[in-house]
Image: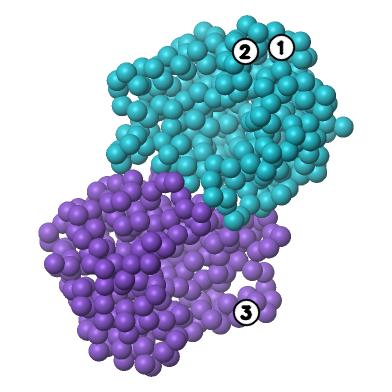
Chain colours: A cyan, B purple
Amino acid sequence: MTHPRLSLNQATIKHANLEQALAVTAAAGYQAIGTWREPVQEVGLARAAALVADSGLRVSSHCRGGFFTVAEGAERRASIDDNRVAIEETAALAAAGAPGSRAVLVLVAGGLPDGDRDIVGARERVRDAIGELVGDAASAGVQLAIEPLHPMYASDRAVISTLGQALDIAEQFPAEAVGVIVDTFHIWWDPQVLPQIARAGAGGRIASYQVCDWATPLPADVLLSRHYPGDGVIDFASLTRAVEDAGYDGDIEVEIFNQQIWDTDAATAAERTAEAFEAAVAPHLSATTAVRSA
Amino acid sequence: MTHPRLSLNQATIKHANLEQALAVTAAAGYQAIGTWREPVQEVGLARAAALVADSGLRVSSHCRGGFFTVAEGAERRASIDDNRVAIEETAALAAAGAPGSRAVLVLVAGGLPDGDRDIVGARERVRDAIGELVGDAASAGVQLAIEPLHPMYASDRAVISTLGQALDIAEQFPAEAVGVIVDTFHIWWDPQVLPQIARAGAGGRIASYQVCDWATPLPADVLLSRHYPGDGVIDFASLTRAVEDAGYDGDIEVEIFNQQIWDTDAATAAERTAEAFEAAVAPHLSATTAVRSA
């Protein structure tokens, strides 16, 4: 049986198009899916929303906006505008999803622009971009969700590396409009992770809990170094309990970038994900929150 | 001209034996070297000390002890005993080096033991091991120096990932006996890096400042992903000024693990290191501390 709080992030079955991804996810007994922009745009937003509605699935988040570190100019304007489109997508998909869908847009900060060594300045530009978008997000009923990425991506993907940093930015805005993503892969190593999860929960900032595992040696492309929960070294017991204790009772996504998993067929990956979640994560969820209220 | 505060960490010219390393370093105009245990043990400590004395070089640090995360038992006892030997080596080499040598033993915490997911417990075992060794270090006039490693090594090399964590442990012991290493490669991404450098300096805890650069894409073996200062994205201006402002006026080591650099001949690597340091780091050192007092 697939856990009622488990959501399959579409990146885990990257080679499926939206229609296939929805079908595979529903057939495997999931109640929720995390969508990605590219497969949504491939069919267009109206058709994507109709497919989501037909699937009967909740939408747990929409991935991803962000990439906010370039200096003022045409590229930055294009990025901000594109994030406005992403906010619309997020709202439309959540409205189309089953009751309990969350209008959460995952944001990846972006890395250092070429030739730029000023990481402090880059971080300020992330905050400023969120400040520009927060009104649009609030109007659309969307929560922007800053995702700290592992520090090994600080130069080329995300200058926001810790939950504490993400919260420092998020807390400058209303919680309904700006939250954070708690993703075990990115933050398991952080000595401050447990108190920062508590801080995020206390402020109503946990937009999503994502679980996948860390193992070494890292593959040649470190972007693809995620594993099924249980196949690595992450202590899902302490992290999951911390997220529960912080009051988060929403869907829990499994989002895995891994070439071997992408090379298996989507139905197999969906099934294997559910098994891994049941073994490594579900035992640490309290019974009272295991059945999610819509 | 090779900068008077620049020290060549022996790992940068890994394929040279101790005698060759000392000769190359002195010939390139350096005043200091950071030694490694393996090449010292290859010739024996007495001979190594004699070679160091003959070289006229200062010893800036000795690498490396540590690996303290295994649970109590024979392996842990062997590791503690081996660190006692490393303390003796450190004292002997610093005594043999030119005036201004520092008896600093660099410590790498160690990763998660096989099958262990309890990173909090592993960190406690690091602190406990240092507690066992601090008396020996103090007696020998050696400063143990905890080196936080980049979080991408948290599972397999070092469960201490940030300067703040390293200081949390170091501050439980006298500053003369336990300090920290400030290595740009490992901590440049940390949003807390500047205040933590100030904290380290205020407490007299900066045992060494090490500089090399971060660039992406990372190589297949992420252990070998270090670059000459200036060849990556690290802001040596802000970090170097912070270390200066924190009161550190000792030698500055360049320690690079990089297959391409190891594949060049040692004299070329020593020269290239000095040039890179001069261009990327030296401009941020204040004139008054550029001539080091012994």
Is disc 1 in contact with disc 2, using a CB cutoff of under 8 Å?
A: yes
Tell me the mark number nearer the camera, choosing from 1 and 2. Answer: 2
Q: Is residue B267 visible?
A: yes
Is disc 1 in contact with disc 3, using a CB cutoff of under 8 Å?
A: no
Instruction: Locate residue B208, reporting x and y percent.
Output: 33, 65
Within the image, what quadrant is residue A21 found in? top right
- Tag 3: residue type? Arg
Q: Which residue is mark 2?
A: A43
Quadrant of the rendering where the C terminus of chain B is positioned = bottom left
- Residue at the right extreme of this rendering: A1
Choose the circle earlier in sequence order: 1 or 2.
Answer: 2
Res A209 label: none
Frontmost residue, A78 versus B127: A78
Q: Is residue A62 above or below residue A155?
A: above
Tell me the mark number nearer the camera, choosing from 3 and 2. Answer: 2
What residue is at 49 percent from the left and 84 percent from the top? Answer: B85
Quadrant of the rendering where the N terminus of chain B is positioned = bottom left
